Amino acid sequence: MAVTLQHYSFLLLSFSWMLMIIGRPRIVAGYFQPSQWTPANATFYGDESASATMGGACGYGNLFINGYGKDTAALSSTLFNNGYACGTCYQIQCVQSSACYSNVPYTTVTATNICPPNWAEDSNNGGWCNPPRSHFDMSKPAFMKIAQWEAGIVPVMYRRVPCERSGGLRFSFQGNGYWLLVYVMNVGGGGDIGNMWVKGSGTGWISMSHNWGASYQAFATLSGQSLSFKAISYTTQETIIAWNVAPTNWGAGLTYSSDVNFS
Ligand SMILES: *[C@@H]1O[C@H](CO)[C@@H](O)[C@H](O)[C@H]1NC(C)=O
């Protein structure tokens, strides 16, 4: 190997120093700019069908239907941020391993799950997702884009990037006429949601609380009313209003699409 660890650390240091001058992740007029490249490690879970990635801790359910596809990852709790990182997007580059595909600069994944700590294993040997480690447990198809899967684990560099989505925010409903639980999906821009409100056709804006993953809830009587949502991006603080997303006969188990999204 021509590049020793010392060289590499030096390069990293110089690189970080450069970035301090150029600037940290910037938010220009609500538009989210990529963060700096940061070291982590990556493994994969499931098989090539990515079916094991469905029903992850963000609550997106079927990722193919809900706009996130096969290129997804489970984040260690350090990165998962209690679910606020659900929907965020990362470019991941394989580095410093002979298993890396050197002709592939990076691949892009969406966070759809948590990789929980495994305290029975040492952090350097199986307990990859134990705090404070930054770790991506990628879908196998995503991992296979950057490295030979037989390697099992590879060092990576990653950076947060804006999420590119087609179409508007989608709102998937659970609950009943007195308790509404909404999963927000297909989120563009920062990809994350920091605050939500719901407005029935007969109410004012009602603040929703973060439940788990990418879900928000309101304890309010909303049956028989058409529903609008106001959402604030966790990262950019941009506000979006999706008017009359759900009709008066809305129901749990259904998903409603809007025609607005974050940039
Ligand atoms: C990646 O894994 C190796 C081996 O466990 C470890 O030494 C290194 O610190 C890890 N890198 C990061 C950024 O956690």
Image (tube, rainbow, N blue to C red):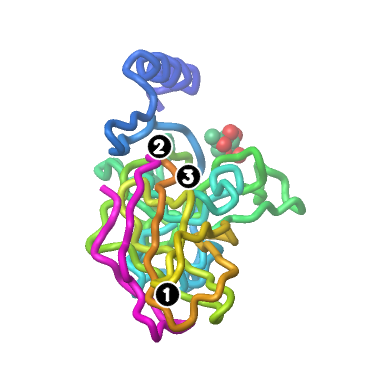
Residue at far right of view? 120
* In the image, residue 259 lies in the stretch drawn in magenta: yes
Residue 62's disc is 1
Q: Quadrant of the N terminus?
A: top left
Q: Callout 3: 10 Å neighbours few (<14), some, many (20+)?
A: many
Q: Which residues are magenta?
A: 236-263
Q: Which residue is mark 2?
A: 95
Dividing the picture into quadrants, the one containing residue 231 is bottom left
Look at the magenta stretch and give its main secondary structure. Answer: loop
The reply to whether residue 62 is visible in this rendering is yes
- Residue closer to the observer: 21 or 94: 21
Say whether residue 85 is left or right of residue 110.
Answer: right
- Residue closer to the observer: 206 or 41: 206
Label 3: which secondary element: strand
Q: Callout 2: 10 Å neighbours few (<14), some, many (20+)?
A: many
**Image location of residue 70, percent across then percent down:** 36, 65
* In the image, residue 16 lies in the stretch drawn in magenta: no
Residue at 59 percent across and 43 percent down: it is 78
Q: Which residue is mark 3?
A: 154
Pointer 2 with pointer 3, Cβ within 8 A: yes
Q: CA distance from mark 1 to mark 3?
A: 28 Å
Q: Which circle's residue, 2 or 3, is located before the other in the chain?
A: 2
Report ligand 1 position as a quadrant: top right
Q: Amino acid under label 2?
A: Val
Residue at 49 percent across and 23 percent down: it is 5
Q: Amino acid under label 1?
A: Asn
Dividing the picture into quadrants, the one containing residue 62 is bottom left
Residue at 40 percent across and 37 percent down: it is 95
